[in-house]
Amino acid sequence: MYYVKSQGGKNEQQTKNDEKPDNGFQSKNNVHRITPMSEKEELARLVLQWCLVVARIAPDSPRLAWYCSRWNVPGKIADAAAAGTLADTLAGCPPIDRKHLPAGIAAIAAWHEYQQPPMLPDTEETRLQARQSSSAA
């Protein structure tokens, strides 16, 4: 049997003994603060729920932003809310974790970007004109 002496002095040994055991529970820091969601976060949650229930697209799917922008998901949510069918549509959706909200916010940003008009108006002057080759003329 070997005896190993600690490298620290008396003070280090005393502080280790003075610490109370954690036992996986801290009495002061066990209060969970739930902050209310902003309108942006609430819409992102609705978009994630809609995509999960209607399109079967998971909140962490790389297709989420594309689907949301091309299929006008925020518009469909607004239409369903106006018709009073949104709660029934999303009734079977499991809870959405707050860690997925940034993906929902990014999907809404992609939708806004997709809704923007093109940079150049589609007029006769902005279109590229086909030119005939000299041999075809």
Image (cartoon, grey):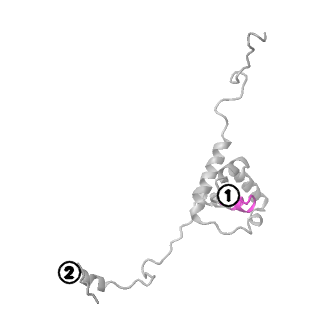
**Where, quadrant-wise, is the C terminus in this rendering?**
top right
61 w.r.t. 119: above or below: below
Report the magenta residues as a range: 49-58
Residue at 62% x, 56% y: name it: 104
Residue at 67% x, 43% y: name it: 114
In this rendering, position of residue 89 left or right of residue 114: right
Q: Of label 2 and label 1, which has the lower sequence position?
A: 2
Look at the numbered disc 1 and give the secondary structure of its residue.
helix
The outermost residue toward the left is 9
Q: Would you identify the image quadrant in which residue 5 lies?
A: bottom left
User: In this orientation, which residue lies closer to the viewer: 128 or 98?
Assistant: 128
According to the image, label 1 marks what residue? 47
**Where, quadrant-wise, is the N terminus in this rendering?**
bottom left
Q: Cα distance, mark 2 to mark 1?
A: 59 Å
Residue at 50% x, 72% y: name it: 33
According to the image, label 2 marks what residue? 9
